[in-house]
Amino acid sequence: MKIKYFSINFGKLLLCSMVFVFGAFVGSAVTAISGLHQPPMPKGVDSSFAFLLLSLGSPLMALVLALIARGLAGRLLARALTISFFTWVTYTLNTAVESLAFTDTTIEGALSTTISFLFPSIFIGFAVALLFPSVDNYESMIVLVKSFFGRRTTAAWAWRIAVALLVFVPIYIFFGSLVAPITGQYFQENMYGLRQPGQYEMLFVLMVRSVLFLLACLPIIVMWRRSKWSLIFRLGSALFVLVGLLFMLGAYYMPLSIRIPHTLEILADSFAYAGVIVLLLLHDSLHFD
């Protein structure tokens, strides 16, 4: 029975990954028709091989999204849109914003990528929501939102949301400072298309990313119907995979001296952020109201 259950779910994950890859083809076609130019590949990178790595990593993306989908209440459309939005923001929009500061990517290139990957994000979001349903999928989104925000006063929510909007900034700065002595030289010497942004530029980008992460994670937190510790693990895993791991696995042209420390940094960022944001918005023992 366990083998059959594993086989069925593995097949579902492969189907979701194929839907994502198909969506990537659709997105590329749309951006080509629109006249937007894709950002150039880093020197020495083969585009076909890069797309192969993207395809091979898509089942891992489907897995972490499926783990989240299982714990979401709400109807199919709300769950699908929530997962799609989370995927697009964390995997694409966040990366586009970061690339403008830390790489030579142009605004047109970032816009092209953002539009192109909107389609695979929507495709995989709907596939995961449909194939990995929750046990509680009857309540409307309006009911879920009212129930969630009705648990506290306006003042109680005000300081929590204010902190949540900016909490990624100190988390990133702390863990980034730990790996900077190892990876900093590559940014300072503009190697592999990397660059070192100014202090104020970096702070602005971090604030934008912090807001984006909250926008992506908040619907999941509102709709969550399992334990908060389960959410911390699943949300942290999803952030780690979508924000960093898939990109680091595909950055085969970079030395391990960049990829390994940066991967560990993103792992720490992801779980620290997930833990803070979930406890901040779900935990009932923070009495600063």
Image (cartoon, rainbow, N blue to C red):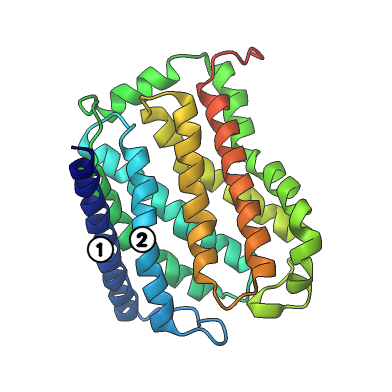
Q: Identity of the amino acid at label 2? A: Ser
Give the quadrant of the C terminus. Answer: top right
Q: Identity of the amino acid at label 1? A: Met
Q: Nearer the viewer, residue 69 or 196?
A: 69
Q: Which residue is mark 2?
A: 58
Spatial CA distance of label 2 from label 1 is 8 Å
Residue 273 can be seen, yes or no: yes
Q: Tell me, yes or no, whether the two marked residues, 2 and 1, touch with CB atoms within 8 Å.
A: yes
Q: Nearer the viewer, residue 283 or 153?
A: 283
Q: At which x and y percent is residue 71?
A: 34, 32
Q: Is residue 51 above or below residue 216?
A: below
Give the quadrant of the N terminus. Answer: top left
Residue 48 appears in which quarter of the rendering? bottom left
Q: At which x and y percent is residue 16?
A: 26, 55
Residue 198 can be seen, yes or no: no
Q: Which residue is mark 1?
A: 18
